Image (cartoon, rainbow, N blue to C red):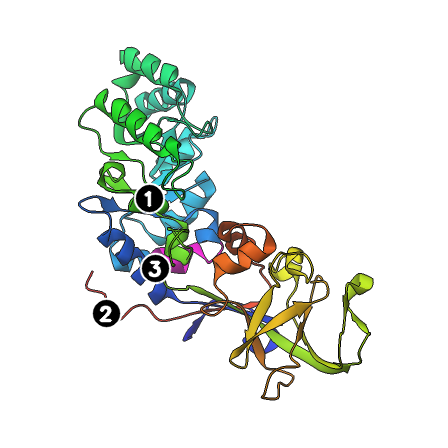
Amino acid sequence: MDQTLSATPKDLAGAVLSIDLGAIQKNWRYLASHAGSAECGAAVKGNAYGLGVEPVGRALWDAGCRSYFVARPKEGEELRGVLPEATIYVLDGLFPGQAEFYAQNNLLPALISIEEAREWVAFGRVYGRKLPCAIHVDTGINRLGFSMDEYAALLADRATLDGLSVSLLMSHMACADEPGHPLNAKQRDAFKAVRAKLPGVPASLANSAGIFLGKDYAHDLVRPGIAIYGGNPTPALSNPMHAVALLEGTILQTRDVAANETVGYSATWKAARKSRVAVLGAGYKDGVPRSLSSGNSNNPPQVFLGGKRCPIIGRVSMDMMAIDVTDLTQAVKRGDRAEILGPNILIDEAANWAGTISYELLTRLGSRYARLYSELDSGLQA
C-alpha cells in the first residue's frame, strides 16, 4: 500500500484498513464487461460503502465510470467537489425546499413523487431552464418511487411532465441476488411496461446482482454497488470479484491460558486445554461486529494469521478481541497483524458469521484506524 489518507499513522493504530483502488477498478471493469451495451455506473453512497468517496470516486473515474449514484444531497456535494464533470444522481429524491442546492451542485434528483416533480419544475422555471432529473418508479420493492397509479398521473399531467428534463427512468430490484425468485421476472415485466410509456428515455434497472440476470435487465445503464467493493453479486456461485478491503488487527499482547480458564467479558469462552491467546487492537468501535464473538454463530468466526485461520474466542469488546493461536507453528508477537477481513477472510463469509450482510460490515467500518490506499491499476486503458 503506497498512499495513506489517514491522520492516524499505521504504527499508532490498533487496526489498519488497506483499500486496494486497483481492485476497485478491476471489479468495475469486470461488471462493465458483463453489462452488454449498457453503460456501467457506480453506486458510491454511504462514503463509497465506507471506503472513502474521494479516492474511490477518482479511481472509478480513471477506470471509465461517468455516472454515479449517491443517497443524500450532501454526499452529492462532496462527490461533485471531487468529480466536477460526473453525472451524479441522488437516489433519495428531492429534499423539501432544497432544489437550489441540487441545482447549484448539478445534482440530479431521482424524483419519487408528483410533489417532488412539481417542486423541481417550479424551481426550474425560476432558474430559467428545465433541470435534468431521473424518474424513479416502484415496480415491486415498495420503498421509494412513483407507484404505478402515481406514474400514470404524472404522464397525464402534461404541464409537469413537459417541464422536466428526464435523463433517466429507473427502478430498483428487491430480489436480484436470488435468480430464481418470481419477483425478478415480475419487476422486469413491470419495468418494461413503465418504459414503454416514456419512450426514448434511457432506462436503468439492474444493480450488482441484476447485471448477472441477463440482457433483459440491463437496459441502458446498470448501477452496481456492493460488487465494486468486493461483495459477491452471485451468492449461489463463487465470488468473481477481487477483495478490496483488508482489515487487520494489531497484536497487543500474547498470553498463556491454562485449561478451564476463561477469556473476555462474561467468561463466555473456556479453554479446553492449555492455550496460547493473542489479543488484537480491534473491536466494535472499529467496525468489528460484537456478533463475531465466539458462540454467536453457527460457524466459528475466524481471523487469518501466520498462513492459517485462527478462531475468535470470547466476546468482541469495544477496543479489542482475542484469538486462539495455539495451533500456529510459527511464533506470533506483539505488533504482528491478523487479517479480520480480506482475501483470506472474505467479507461475505464474515458477514454470514456475524448474521448480517457485506453491505453492513463495510459501511460500519470505524474511523480510528489507519487507512491506506493502494496505487491504481496500471493496466487501465481508460
Rendering quarter of residue 136? top left
Relative to the observer, which residue lies in front, 179 or 248? 179
Q: Is residue 53 magenta?
A: yes
Residue 111 against residue 374 in the figure, above or below: above
Q: From what the image shows, is residue 348 above or below residue 94?
A: below
Q: Earlier in the sequence, mark 2 or mark 3?
A: 3
Left or right of 358: which side holds 382? left
Q: Nearer the viewer, residue 183 or 382?
A: 183
Going from the N terminus, do you reach mark 1 or mark 2 first?
Answer: 1
| Coordinates of residue 302 in the picture (x, y in percent) | 59, 67
Judge left or right: residue 47 versus residue 15. left
Indicate whether residue 117 is drawn in magenta: no
Please tell me whether mark 3 sits on a helix, a strand or a loop. loop
Name the residue type under label 1: Arg
Tell me if residue 31 can be seen: yes
Tell me how far mark 2 sits from mark 3, CA to CA: 19 Å
**Circles 1 and 2: CB distance less than 8 Å?**
no
Residue drawn at x 48%, y 48% as measured from the top left? 46
What is the quadrant of the C terminus in the image? bottom left
In this view, 249 is above or below 283: below
> Residue 240 has which mark?
3
Q: Secondary structure at mark 1?
A: loop
The residue to which callout 1 is attached is: 223
Q: Callout 3: 10 Å neighbours few (<14), some, many (20+)?
A: some
Mark 2 lies on residue: 379
Q: Residues within 10 Å of mark 2 (few under 14, many from 20)?
A: few
Looking at the picture, how far across and down is residue 375, in whole percent? 35, 71
Q: Residue at x 39, y 49 (%)?
A: 225
Kindly identify the residue that appears in the image at 36 percent across and 19 percent down: 122
Q: Quadrant of residue 369?
A: bottom right
C-alpha span from label 1 to label 3 = 17 Å
